[in-house]
Image (cartoon, helix red, strand yellow):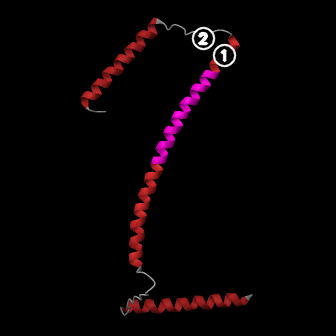
Amino acid sequence: MYLPFIFFFLSLSGIIVMIGRELILIKNGQAIAVEHSHPFVADIQKIKHLIFKNSKKFGYAILFVTLKFFIKSSNFIKTKSIILIEKIKNKIKKKNNILNNETIEKKEVSGYLKVISEYRQKIKKIKHIIKEEEGIE
């Protein structure tokens, strides 16, 4: 049981000694950066550069695909929801007609409300014309 702990602390102390020696050399300014090139291992800087470059392209591709999917799915949901709402309204109207045995008639709107709605529409048109002239929209 104690044997793994002993090995762990021995290896930890060995690592600390190696790092301590390097730190002393760096502090004295005697550290030499040695690059070992292996024929089967590529340069790390080149690998980092290629990964960064390819990840940037891949990120743009993912962004494009997600935006395209979002736009298409939102358009699909919008169209299907409109169709579904119309179907539900038709079913409700049919159910009400069956229950009431009469057709649904529109009630006539009072003259005062008609005048107000016409006035509001005129104001909207004027605002729209002003915005177009000012270049706001």
**Residue drawn at (43%, 64%) of the image:** 55
- Outermost residue, left side: 133
Q: Is residue 117 above or below residue 133?
A: above
Q: Earlier in the sequence, mark 2 or mark 1?
A: 1
Is the C terminus in the top left, top right, bottom left or bottom right quadrant?
top left
The quarter of the picture where residue 46 lies is: bottom left
Mark 1 closeness class: few <14, some 14–19, many ≥20 residues within 10 Å: some
**Residue at disc 1, secondary structure:** helix
Q: Is residue 35 above or below residue 86?
A: below
Nearer to us in this view, 125 or 61: 61
Q: Secondary structure at mark 2?
A: loop
Residue 39 drawn at (x, y percent):
43, 87
Residue under label 1, please give it.
96
Compared to residue 90, the image places residue 55 above or below, namely: below
Residue, x 56% and y 92% (percent of image)? 14
Question: Which is more toward the observer, 91 or 48?
Answer: 91
Residue 16 screen position, x and y as percent? 53, 89
- Alpha carbon of mark 2 to alpha carbon of mark 1: how far? 9 Å
In the picture of the structure, the residue carrying the numbered disc 2 is: 104
Q: Amino acid at mark 2?
A: Ile
Spot occupied by residue 112 in the image (x, y as percentages of width and height): 44, 7
Question: Is 109 included in the stretch rendered in magenta?
Answer: no
